[in-house]
Image (cartoon, rainbow, N blue to C red):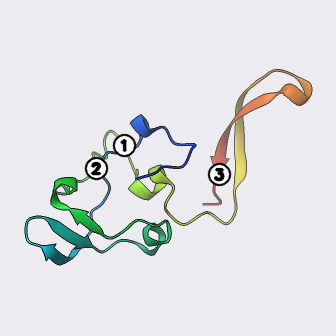
Amino acid sequence: MKLPKSHARKLTPKYIGPFKIVETIEKGATYKLQLSREMLKHGIHPAFHASLLREYVPNDDARFPGRQWHQVLGLGERPTHVQVRRIVTHFGQGPEAQFEVQWSTGD
């Protein structure tokens, strides 16, 4: 799966889901999954070979509280309002200044 340029592959989950199997195309080989509209809109085909599928294991909320796959991959609904919650730090001065910020999505 092609990821947005702003996402490092090693920091994204290897597997996402769970997804419901809606059709067995070829027993033990190919399955059709019920994907979200957003994933289909990004051109992800719903048929997957069995070697690409894994049994769903829920997230470890102690290590990753509230983390959802669509937040990590950027495939979820885009927020309608985004603003800077706070400036964490900055580097440089004038027009060359760079800021590290914490974003708020209007929640």
For the question of whether residue 57 can be seen, the reply is no
- Label 2 Cα crowd, 10 Å radius (few <14 / some 14-19 / many 20+): few
* Residue type of the residue flagged with mark 2: Asn
Q: Which residue is mark 2?
A: 59
| Image x and y of residue 104, in percent | 65, 51
Choose between 35 and 83: the one closer to the eye: 35
Choose between 102 and 75: the one closer to the eye: 75
Q: Can you name the residue that lies furthest to the bottom here?
A: 23
Element marked by disc 3? strand
Instruction: Give the residue displayed 40% in from the left and 35% down from the top.
Output: 10
Instruction: Give the residue displayed 90% in from the left and 30% down from the top.
Output: 95
- Residues under labels 2 and 1: Cα distance? 7 Å
Q: Which residue is mark 1?
A: 64
| Image x and y of residue 66, in percent | 40, 52
Is residue 12 shown above or below 23? above
| Image x and y of residue 80, in percent | 67, 66
- Residues under labels 1 and 3: Cα distance? 19 Å
- Label 3 Cα crowd, 10 Å radius (few <14 / some 14-19 / many 20+): few
Count of labels shown? 3
* Residue type of the residue flagged with mark 1: Phe
- Residues under labels 3 and 2: Cα distance? 24 Å
Mark 2 and 1 residues: CB-CB less than 8 Å, in contact? Answer: yes
Q: Which residue is mark 3?
A: 104
Relative side of 93 to 98, left or right: right
* Residue type of the residue flagged with mark 3: Ser
